[in-house]
Amino acid sequence: EPASVFRTGAGLGLFVAEDRFDCKYSIKCIASGLKSPTVADQAKLKRLGRYLKEVPVIVWYYDYQSKQDFLTAFSDSDWQSDVQTRRSTSAGLEMYGSHPVDTLSGSQETVSLSTAEAEMKATTRVVAGAIQTREVHKAFELACDILAKTDSSAGRAMLQRRGGGKVKHLE
């Protein structure tokens, strides 16, 4: 049955996504079709398979670096990237010095009514992951502060104010 084959391939993609930062967004898009896969979803999976066949290995070099003061969390969002559900996509990268530690790409739970709201949600999600990573670093006596970076001045302004302010319709 084609749906079963698709789900198997998507499951393998989800397994690979933990080690392949370059595929996370593609696999997120493929996984959104797990419930009832379409021909378009199968085409996305085939395209990913061709890419992984062409680029089978990604090598990350972690050169020696001294203890770092900051865990830097970069965030971005793609406002209403899913045409059908109108949900935005959050993306993030955590860096310890020059070393990538973790990445994320995922759909936001609710529909964002503005780009600022989508950016705020993305930054919040990435910083929450960075807090978890920082706690793991503490266990290895690598305590550090978190430095959050975003490209959205409106999202940053929403995060820096106390209370709702002039924001309307925030979910």
Image: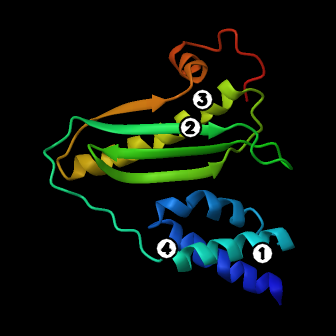
Query: Which tag is nearer the camera, tag 1 or tag 4?
Result: 4
As helix, strand or loop, the secondary structure at mark 3 comes to helix
C-alpha span from label 4 to label 3:
34 Å
On the image, numbered disc 2 is attached to which residue? 76
For the residue marked with disc 2, what is the amino acid? Asp
Query: Which tag is nearer the camera, tag 4 or tag 2?
Result: 4
Q: Residues within 10 Å of mark 3 (few under 14, many from 20)?
A: many
Q: Nearer the viewer, residue 70 or 44?
A: 44
Q: Quadrant of the C terminus?
A: top right
Residue 95 vs residue 81: left or right? Answer: left
Q: Residues within 10 Å of mark 4 (few under 14, many from 20)?
A: few
C-alpha span from label 1 to label 4:
20 Å
Residue drawn at x 55%, y 63% is 23
Q: Residues within 10 Å of mark 2 (few under 14, many from 20)?
A: many
On the image, numbered disc 3 is attached to which residue? 120
Q: Earlier in the sequence, mark 4 or mark 3?
A: 4
Say if residue 38 shows up in the picture. no
C-alpha span from label 2 to label 1:
27 Å
On the image, numbered disc 1 is attached to which residue? 42
Residue drawn at x 42%, y 74% is 57
